[in-house]
Each structure stands twice: as structure tokens, then as C-alpha cells.
Amino acid sequence: MRFKKSACKLTQQAKLFILFIWLSLCSLTQAETENVDYSESDQELLDELMAIVDESTAIATQTRMNANSVPGIVSVLDGAEMESLGMRSVWDALSWVPGLMTTRDGSGISLTARGLSFPFSSGNIKVLLNSKSMSQESSGINSTILQIPIEQVERIEVVRGPGAVVYGDNAFMGLVNIITKSDENRVFSRFESNGAIAGGANGVYLDERNKVKVAANVYAFDHQSATTPNDRFASEDRQFGVFSLQYKDLAISAQSYHRDYDLRDRNKIREGSDAITLQQSWAFSNELKSDWSFAYSQNDYQLERNDFSGNRFEGGVDLHWSGWRSHQFWLKFSYVDEHIDQARMQRARPSQFNRPPPPLRLNDVTRTYYSISLQDQFEVTEDLTITASLRFDHRDDIKEDFFTPRVSAVWRINDEHILKAQYAEGFRAPTFFEFYPNPQHNLNQETIETTELSYIHHQANYTGKVVFFYSHIDNMIYPFRERFNNDKEAESFGVELEWMQQLTPYFKWQANVSYVDSWDTRNRNNSRSGDPTAASWLSNIALFYKPMEKIMITARWNYVGERNNSTTDVDAVHRLDLTLNATDLFDSGFSLKLGVNNLFSDQRHHLLNLPVSGATLLDYGNQADVWLQLSYKH
């Protein structure tokens, strides 16, 4: 099934009609539910579908805890909830995280965290798939993995701020860990009015007697009229797969993601990542446990002016010991060997006035490094927990040893009030295109220092959060006369607010708003100026309304404020998405979702900011998109 391209543009009357029907349905069904008694089934619905605070994560400390109790600022996005809001991919869902702005760069996607953008490595945010990296840090590429379909996502764990102590290089501005589904059998397909078609399946086999579990996810996407800036033409197809086998405490997984993007008037863009991971766990006693992991990945990337091909081997040993009263110790040793088979980067575009310098070419280059991390999670009292961490890194490319500390405190004043404070540092080593143009190879790592204060107010039916943060970045890498130097700095401070409330078993709402004030000196005259691509204000509001057992209606409003750019006028963006969710129709496991994204056709503008050349406006049009998803679960 394919919609004609002309169908993607809705008239203003059609949009208003859709909105009127949606509001009318809400009004009619409200009368039905006002006088209904809350039965046991209603309470189950409240507990299962509308739970808003009982999320757990191991991302911040390697120790599974409630997300409100871990140190640092952690957000956990539920995959099913994001799907019910009409999100199409992990990248779409991340726009829900306070302080995180989703951006486009002309041929791909990226992120901007807390008012500072970076033109590589998804805005200097480390992206993991099932807690494993799919990309070499040398390449500066990890954005394509963010296009995993939301139908295959169990949850998304997000750390705002540096997470280098636990996860190392590139966990600089933040960390995203995508956990795919491994406990359901489901097939799904999706059709969009812009011509995109997608489909996939999740499957699991479980033998509890022999402790064997096999899970698989596959997905394919095709779009012959892909979204491009400035009315250009492109086609895009993507393939994604995850296979995992678990036998007792041994786990083997294979993960793959490939993307072809054919911009008709330019060369094709190809990106592929494949990884195999082996993990073994041992429990020597109730107090001492260990995890051993080995991973091999292959990365290939081809662009008009850049190519990269290489592989990466990573091995690690984790030890968890809780034999000392009130303490949980975590010790990790990791070793990484990155090999660049070949890489090319054209450092300047040709012009009629001069010849460009020859491209940077690399062949058969190896970078190795190892790290040791130590952490103590100390329960000072029943209500106060202090976590202190220290990481040591040695790299053969930078030829410098350095330490990265973190200290945090969580004070659970009572069941309703939690205070959190954290100081953390992070680092980012130079990528190959920054490091190797310098004949002396004298670049150092960028460093970030972040202080965060958070207050959480939680009751049975609502949770409110406020976060204050301040970050300073030093030794920023910036080009000067075809070379790179560590001579720039940046600063970012602001506030992030969140609210989640269950009003009735049938209705809940969530909202967040963030404000950031930032500056950096990434310009020729070394002056302090705001990041031209970033917005100071970001906000979201979501409504979940369940008028009957198998029907849920959702609405989501996303706001991105005016950009800080002084030369290009980019207005604020108001985007409204509506979704109708119908589950288990005909009592058969069959489900249907129907939605419209960008209902009022707000203009979709993005800014691409590259070193030296400055900000470029990318216009992705103002069309609304209607989509239909069909799925079957058994």
C-alpha cells in the first residue's frame, strides 16, 4: 500500500475537522466514564497502563534502582507509551526528554543537549544498543542507530550530563541506552501519507526448564520520497536486526543496522554497523558477582566527501561486591582496540579561485586504550546514599593518562521528597578527522565539568521534578588553518521541570519545560556567543485518555523556541500530534493505530552549524503526515 505524494498535504479545513472529531470523541466518552465505579479491573488498568513512577534503570550506577533514586539526572522512556503518542523512532521519542533537542543535518539526524550542539557523534551523546556501543568513537558517527523503530523498543534510558565514569569516551553531553523488546511475539506494519512503508517482527522462545531464551527483532523501511531540505529528492531504505541467545548465565547477541540514503543530485550515503557480543555472568557468592564481556563491531560509512571503514574489539570485566555493610563496590576493567581500515575526508570544497588541499587519507591505523573504574555506593543512613566514582584512562593516541571523578548524594527525606546533588566530569577524545590532520598529533581530550541539583516530589498519583544544572567545557577542539587546536571553551546553565499526574484511571497527563542559557567561543575572534542552532526554551505536553478498555486517545504538543542565530530568522515551532490507539480488537491480539503528526502544518526548520562556515538553514517544509499502523501480538 502506498499513498500518493499529493495526499500528504492536508487542507486547513481537514485539519480542523480532525481536531473537532477528536475533541468530540473525548467529550462523548467523558459522559460515559464520569459515574463509573473504580473496580478491580480499573485498578489493574491504573497499575499497568498508567503507572508513572515505577521505572528502574541500571544506567547510572550499574546497580538496578528506581530511576528517582539513582544519582544523576536519569529519564526512562517507556517504549509502549512513546508508541501510543505516535512516535516513530527513538529519535522522535528523545524530543520528550527535557533539555534535549532533536535536529537534522541535511542527510541524517542528531541531538543538541542543554544548549550546545556538536556536528558529530549525535551531538557528543553516546548511544548504546542494549548497553553495547555500535560505533567506533574514532569515526564520530552514531546517529543512524537512533532511527530504530519505536515498535521494537522496550525502554530508552537517558542520562543528561556527562556519564564518562561509567561508560567512557563520548558520554560527554549525555548517554542514550536503547533496550529492545525480548519478551513478546508481534508483527507490525506502518503506512504513511508521505509514501513511507515499514514493517517488522519481534519473536521470543523461552524454555524455562532448561533456562534457554531466544529472541529476535527484524525491521525494514522504504521511502522513495524521503524527507529532505529545500525541496530536494531522495530515497531511503533501512534494515535493522537483533538476535540474542541466552543459556543460564551465558548470553550471545548479534546486532545490525544499515541505511542507504540516495540524494538524487549527489552521491549515495551508506552507513552500516554490525556487532557481536558475548557475555558471561558468575555469582561466586551472595556478595561477589562478576560479568565478563567481549564485543566485536564493524563500521562502514560513505558520504560524498567522507568515507570511513573500520572495526573495534572491546573486552571488559566487572566485579560487584557487597560484603561490607552499607557499601556496594563496583570495579571494572576494559580494553579497546580500534582499527581504521581506511578513511577519507575532503577538508575543503573546490572553488574557481583556488585548488582545495588534498583529502585526508588514512589506512591501517590502530588506536588502543584501556580504563579502570571504581565506584562505592555507600548508604550513610537509610535515607542518605553517597556514590563516589573514579575512572582512570590510558590512550596510546593522546599519550596522556587522566582521571575522571564523580560524586553524588541522594537524600530520601521521606516517601514524598527526594533531594539529589551531583558533580561529574567527562571527556571526549578527538575523532580521526580532528586528530590526524595535525602532523604533531598534539591534541588533548575535551573536558566537561557539570554540577546538578534536583528535587523530586512524589505521591501515589503524581510526580514533580526540578533540576538545576551548570556545565563548563574546556579544551574544545576547533579548526584553525586546516589544523585543530584545544583553545575554545563553553558554558551552559539552566533549569528543567517535569510533571506527571494520574487524574483518574482513565486520564493522565505529563509535561516538561526546560530553559538554558549557554555560550561558547567557537568562532574566529574567540568571543562569547550563543550556539546559533540551539533554542533556549523547550517544552512538551502529553494527554492520555482511555474512554474504554481497548481504546486510548493521545495528544502531544511539542514546542521548540526561537533559535539563538542572529543571521538566520528561525521562528519557534509548535507541533501537535494526535493518535488513536485500538488494541486487542476482536479479542484476537490485533491492534490498530491511526494518527496525524504536525496537525497544523507548522514549518519545520533546522539549522546546521559547521566550524568556520557557520549556520545554514534547512527547510523541511510544513506538511502534516497521516499514518496507519497495524500489528498482531500473540
Image: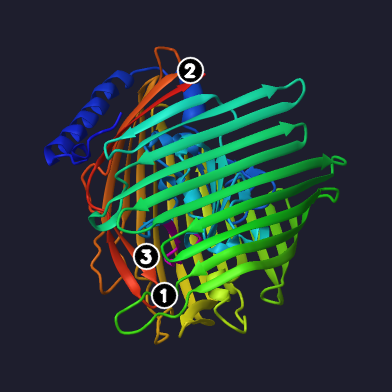
Viewer-side label of 3, 1: 1
> What is the residue that sits farthest to the right in this orientation?
284
According to the picture, the residue beneath numbered tag 3 turns out to be: 534
The answer to whether residue 397 is visible is yes
Q: Secondary structure at mark 2?
A: helix
Would you say the residues marked 2 and 1 are in contact, meaning their CB atoms lie under 8 Å apart?
no
According to the picture, the residue beneath numbered tag 1 turns out to be: 611
Tag on residue 275?
none
- Image x and y of residue 499, in percent: 43, 46
Q: Secondary structure at mark 3?
A: loop
Give the residue type that dot 1 points to.
Pro
N-terminal-most mark, 2 or 3: 2
Q: CA distance from mark 2 to mark 1?
A: 58 Å
Magenta stretch encompasses residue 184: no
The answer to whether residue 327 is visible is no
Give the residue type that dot 2 points to.
Ser
